[in-house]
Image (tube, rainbow, N blue to C red):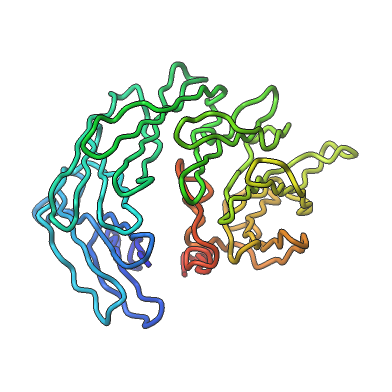
Amino acid sequence: IAVSGEAHLRGGFQPSFLYDTTSGSGFLLGGRGTQVVLSDDGERALWLEPESGASAAYPRVLPKTLFTAQLGGAAVTPHETTITMGPSWAYLALTRDGGRLAALLDRDLSVYELSSERVVASYRLPERAESFIGMLFPTPDRLRVYTFAQASPEEGDFVVREAALGSRLEEVGRFHATGVEPNWRLLRLRLNADASRMLSVERKGAGFTVVLRDARSATAIASVTVTESQDPPFAQFLADGRIVVGGGERVAADAGTMRGLLRVSSADGVVTRSIDLGRALSAVPLGEIAPGRVLVSLRSAEGDWTARQLAEIDLGTGAIRKIGTGLFPAGGWSVAWGRFATPPPPGSLAQRLFVDAEHSV
């Protein structure tokens, strides 16, 4: 796993490590400004490390060098590549096998063949009128990019572009979204494991709807669920293609009481089950700790995440098992609140390692 954060009693030092959970050994990658990405198969690590020098305390002004390492052996041996990038924060995406890397700096997008350390494609995204949402490789030879073109503070269009490497990056899909401000959580897309479908949360009347869409053309397939809550729901794909939507809804008999609710839908968006999670202001699905067993973060009062209750929900029986308070799965941050995410594999370390209120793993 990759771990980063501020070192205890060493103010300003923010190291990044690779940590082997089997042997307990760690490998220091670099300090502040280091960016790490792991391949889906867990066999390769890549990281961008700022060059050392007089400006080391300000890594955003330093160029970065790409390092790679094969994992799984007795020791991590870093390889310093000839690939360098500017000081801006880079958005990174790997092919599933870790053979190619896409890197976006500002508006410049480059695709690297890591075996030869050369650029195999380069593109220029539209200017600042569009915000970057995310990107991925549907196949090793195709790159897909998602952006949001804001027309006004309240609305705009999600835009999907795709290219076969070496050809032009062209628009292949688009859909309109309203009510974006102040609901910035609407600027989130969730894709299934093979990147063929995606979920968007959109304003509908006084509430919200979760829409199942084709991930390439952005064509709507089904409205998965509609809520009347004032807060946008949280939607995720499961590994088998099913969909879970979590949120908080008012009890009809008592308008002042909120209950957490988890809805389960088929891969085609048909709701098959609703699970009452008890009194809660919100319920956030965080992925599967095992197939069909979903982790959910329950917020029962205003406050930060350390007051949230973590529970495991068995989607087959509806059974609820409380795990603890102030715990969050290590992979849950991006799954829940990131702009762009695909589901971690059930039972992966991202779902079985937890961060507590003291930031211990």
Q: Is residue 94 above or below residue 79?
A: above
State left or right for residue 208 relative to residue 66.
right
The residue nearer to you, when weighing 122 against 322, is 122
Q: Image point 60% across, 33% down: which residue? A: 221
Q: Position of residue 127 (x, y in %)?
A: 28, 23
Q: Residue furthest top?
A: 152
Residue 322 in sight: yes
Q: Is residue 56 left or right of residue 283?
A: left
Please give left or right for residue 297 compared with residue 314 in the image.
left
Q: Of residues 126 and 267, which is closer to you in this image?
A: 267
The reply to whether residue 61 is visible in this rendering is no
Front-lying residue, 282 or 1 = 1
For the image, the number of numbered tags is 0
Residue shown at the point (48%, 19%) measured from the top left = 153
Residue 234, how many percent across, how many down? Answer: 61, 43
Q: Residue at x 63, y 46 (%)?
A: 267
Q: Quadrant of the N terminus?
A: bottom left
Relative to 83, is 232 above or below?
above
Where in the figure is residue 254, as x and y percent of width and height? 87, 39
Front-lying residue, 168 or 273? 168
Q: Position of residue 256 (x, y in %)?
A: 82, 39
Looking at the image, the residue that sits furthest to the right is 253
Residue at the (64%, 56%) spot, across then down: 296
